[in-house]
């Protein structure tokens, strides 16, 4: 009985110590490098650029390593750093092609699979992603950014809200509006494809 | 019914597109590359900081030396000029000069000033400009004879002065000038010339 109490006390102490412990850069890299890469990829849409952004993100973190103990939620803080780094990189880098007209979309829509398995499935998947990328690029910036972050599996809506510094309700509203606008464009494209 | 079906189909399509939008995997060894990059940055940082620190120290030292040389040179070239301050030093008996109040206020101001340790030429020039009296030409102190005469006038009772100015005996030609000059003493103006 006494042994159980001592064990419980030890577990409690170690849990408290873990809670207070300041994360090191090494642990942040080990735990969140994939999330950082995906956030960067959702914005930059390029493996090479995404990796560069991830490197830069951790360099920024390293510059503030003395203040890591002030961070309450390392995951969302790191996600925000990654997000802003990727946005900066996108601004300074090449501009993405926006969906001004529907013609390029129609062209890509032609290659969409109808559900039947095809030999060039990988190519079709890439083309689908290009279509979605163009549709998202055609959205207003706030909707596009929210939708891009929502595609990162590691982030839920509360975390997205914390990353973007907006209320969680706003995240949901933005996601609803973004999906609605994309669906409308998809409907038009499907209609055009149907009519030939 | 058909619209609902169509809407559901588009919804499914959008979901399938969004699921894989950011599911990209980084190239193997991302963590290692990030940590290596951080170690490299850490190696560079102290050297950079060291150079930066010494550049600052050198700049500050050079600025101090230049300032000291400049002060020294100026001090040697132009000796401190306090001639103006001397000329408007407090009059021996300022209380009997009610018609020159400006000079008195200037005198008070001079007393309030803190004497600088090393007066430069610029400083003396500024001082001279500040202490320039409003009355021109500059009032000069009384001569020895004038002072004695004034002392006599102030110490002698008024009745005696009047009596002296109207002697019972008829005035002799030689004394007439002196006795007639006494009443005028009241209005003796301070000599306003520095050109004699």
Image (cartoon, coloured by chain):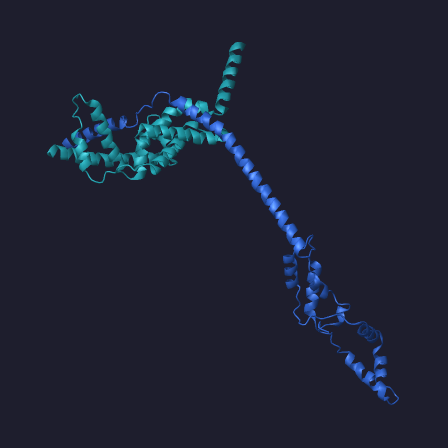
From where the camera sits, is residue B102 visible? yes
Q: Nearer the viewer, residue A10 or B99?
A: B99
Residue B116 as seen in the image, left or right of residue B157 = left
Q: Nearer the viewer, residue B175 or B111?
A: B175
Q: Residue at x 32, y 32 (%)?
A: A44
Q: Is residue B46 above or below residue B32?
A: below
Q: Colour of chain B?
A: blue
Residue A159 as seen in the image, left or right of residue B86 = left
Furthest residue in direction left, as rendered: A196
Q: Nearer the viewer, residue A55 or A111?
A: A55
Q: Position of residue A77 (x, y in %)?
A: 42, 30
Q: How many marks?
A: 0
Q: Residue at x 60, y 47 (%)?
A: B66
Image quadrant in which you'd find residue A140: top left
Image quadrant in which you'd find residue A169: top left
Q: Position of residue B96 (x, y in %)?
A: 76, 72
Furthest residue in direction right, as rendered: B169
Q: Colour of chain A?
A: cyan
Q: Residue at x 14, y 33 (%)?
A: A193
Q: Is residue B135 above or below residue B43?
A: below
Q: Residue at x 32, y 35 (%)?
A: A145
Q: Position of residue B191 (x, y in %)?
A: 73, 74
Q: Is residue A34 above or below residue A5?
A: below
Furthest residue in direction bottom, as rendered: B170
Q: Is residue A120 above or below residue B2?
A: above
Q: Position of residue B192 (x, y in %)?
A: 71, 74
From where the camera sits, is residue B88 visible? no
Query: Quarter of the image containing the C terminus of chain A?
Result: top left
């Amino acid at each position: 009985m006494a042994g159980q109490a001592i064990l419980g006390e030890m577990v409690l102490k170690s849990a408290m110590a873990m809670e207070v412990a300041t994360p090191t850069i090494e642990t942040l890299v080990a735990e969140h490098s994939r999330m950082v890469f995906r956030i960067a990829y959702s914005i930059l849409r390029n493996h090479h650029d995404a990796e560069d952004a991830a490197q830069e993100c951790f360099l920024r973190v390293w510059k503030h390593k003395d203040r890591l103990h002030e961070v309450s939620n390392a995951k969302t803080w790191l996600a925000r750093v990654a997000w802003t780094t990727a946005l900066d990189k996108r601004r300074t880098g090449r501009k993405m092609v926006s969906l001004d007209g529907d013609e390029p979309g129609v062209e890509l829509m032609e290659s969409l699979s109808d559900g039947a398995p095809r030999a060039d499935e990988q190519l079709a998947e890439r083309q689908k992603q290009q279509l979605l990328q163009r549709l998202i690029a055609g959205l207003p910036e706030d909707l596009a950014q929210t939708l891009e972050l929502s595609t990162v599996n590691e982030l839920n809506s509360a975390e997205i809200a914390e990353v973007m510094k907006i209320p969680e309700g706003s995240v949901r509203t933005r996601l609803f509006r973004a999906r609605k606008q994309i669906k409308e464009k998809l409907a038009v494209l499907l209609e055009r494809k149907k009519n030939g | 019914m058909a619209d609902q079906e169509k809407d559901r189909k588009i919804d499914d399509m959008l979901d399938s597109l969004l699921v894989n939008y950011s599911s990209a995997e980084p190239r193997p060894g991302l963590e290692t590359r990030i940590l290596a990059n951080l170690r490299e940055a850490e190696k560079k940082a102290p050297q950079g900081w060291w150079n930066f620190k010494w550049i600052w120290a050198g700049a500050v030292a050079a600025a101090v030396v230049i300032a000291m040389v400049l002060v020294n040179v100026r001090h040697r070239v132009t000796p401190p000029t306090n001639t103006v301050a001397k000329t408007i030093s407090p009059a021996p008996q300022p209380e009997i000069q009610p018609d020159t109040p400006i000079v008195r206020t200037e005198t008070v101001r001079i007393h309030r000033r803190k004497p600088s340790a090393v007066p430069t030429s610029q400083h003396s020039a500024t001082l001279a400009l500040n202490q320039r009296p409003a009355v021109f030409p500059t009032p000069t102190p009384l001569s020895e004879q004038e002072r004695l005469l004034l002392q006599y006038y102030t110490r002698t009772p008024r009745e005696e002065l009047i009596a002296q100015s109207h002697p019972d005996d008829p005035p002799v030609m030689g004394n007439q000038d002196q006795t007639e000059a006494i009443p005028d003493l009241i209005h003796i103006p301070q000599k306003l010339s520095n050109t004699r």
